[in-house]
Structure formats: structure tokens, C-alpha cells
Amino acid sequence: MAQDRREGRGRDRDERDSEFVDKLVHINRVAKVVKGGRRFGFAALVVVGDQKGRVGFGHGKAREVPEAIRKATESAKREMIFVPLRSGRTLHHDVEGRHGAGRVLLRAAKAGTGIIAGGPMRAVFETLGVHDVVAKSMGTSNPYNMVRATFDALKRQMHPKDVAAHRGIKYSTLQARRGAVATEE
């Protein structure tokens, strides 16, 4: 009977893990020079998401590549954030993010635009579940800083209900204003 419980627990963990999509963004080989020569290690940057608005990134280091990727994936699953999406396909508003020398600009896009973004940012959007977005990296091309700047921008993303509550107005009033601005353009 204890065997059945253990098997069931493992199956639940596999189902929970299967709901996430992970993408390897960058792998770095580092060498430590010792008396006998060089010792190589690997560092991996992985982005994990459920394609429904939750996403996280992780960094893992080990002597072997698969072990580094596993560590990074586990780290990413622990550090997930939720991002509100408009119609489940794009961002609610344009936003900038910064980290170190990394600066990114994320812009909401209309249906059919697709993901227009560079490598590390593209991985974040694909695992997040965004289908239409325009993104520009204006600083460094370092994948670690680009991913962190993208996450900084995504953390600043606000749902219109939160904006309405912050301003002290009704959500319907805010939506009516949005419709009026759209018709003027």
C-alpha cells in the first residue's frame, strides 16, 4: 500500500511539472585553472512558464550541462511571477524595464503581430503565453541582464482593475475612457 502512495505522489509531481514549458536561454562554459590543468564548469540560464501568465527564470551551475540545466529549472520554478495579460495574448500597456546596463521596452500589439523580440526576451514571452508583443532591447546584449530587465518590466505591468482601484474610480469608467481614446485615433 505504501508503494501505491509513493507512485501516486510521483505521478502528481510529473503532472505538475508537465504544465510548465522551459526554454534554455544561455549556457556558459567556465574554466578554473588548477595544478593539473583546467576544470570546466557550466552555467545555465533557463526560463520556465505555464503559457497562461506565470513565468520565472533561474540560474544553475554544475560540472555537467544537464545538471546545470536541472538546477536552473528548479530555481526558475521557485521564483515565478504572475503577469496580467489582455485577452490572454498581449500586455495591457507599454512598459520599460531596467537591470544594470540592460534596458528593455515592451509594447502591447494588436492581434496577428506575433512576438517581435530578441532571443532572451523571445524565450520569456513564449513561456509566458504572450502571442502579440513588440520588444526592444536598448542596452546590453548580455542575456542575464536582458532577462532580468524584461522581468522588471513585467513586474510593473498592471491590470486595469488595479489601476482603477489605485485612482479611486470604477473599472467601467476606466474602460469607457479607453474606448473613447481609441475612437478618437
Image: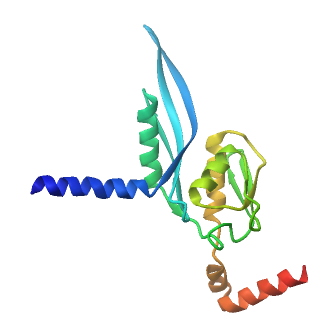
Q: Residue furthest front?
A: 112
Residue 128 position by quadrant: bottom right
Residue plotted at (64% across, 72% down): 158
- Residue drawn 11% across and 55% down? 2
- The quadrant of the rendering that contains the C terminus is bottom right
Q: Is residue 44 left or right of residue 115?
A: left
In the displayed structure, would residue 106 be above or below residue 76? Answer: below
Q: Split into 4 quadrants, where in the image is the N terminus?
A: bottom left
Using the rendered view, name the quadrant where residue 183 is placed: bottom right
Left or right placement of residue 63 versus residue 92 in this view: left
Residue 169 seen in the current view: no
Query: Considering depth in this image, is 166 or 45 the residue closer to the camera?
Result: 45
Asked if residue 162 lies left or right of residue 20, the reply is right
- Residue 139 horizontal/vertical position (percent): 76, 45
Q: Is 118 drawn above or below residue 15 in the view shown?
A: above
Residue appearing at x 46%, y 42% in the figure: 72
Viewer-proximal residue, 99 or 138? Answer: 138
Q: Position of residue 165 (x, y in %)?
A: 62, 85
Please say which color scheme the image uses.
Answer: rainbow
Q: Taking the image as drawn, is residue 67 in sight?
A: yes
Q: Report the front residue among 80 and 152.
A: 80
Q: Residue furthest top?
A: 36
- In this view, the residue farthest toward the right is 185
In the rendered image of this protein, does residue 147 appear above or below residue 40?
Answer: below
Q: How many marks?
A: 0
- Estimate the x, y position of residue 39 in percent, counting from the top left: 46, 17
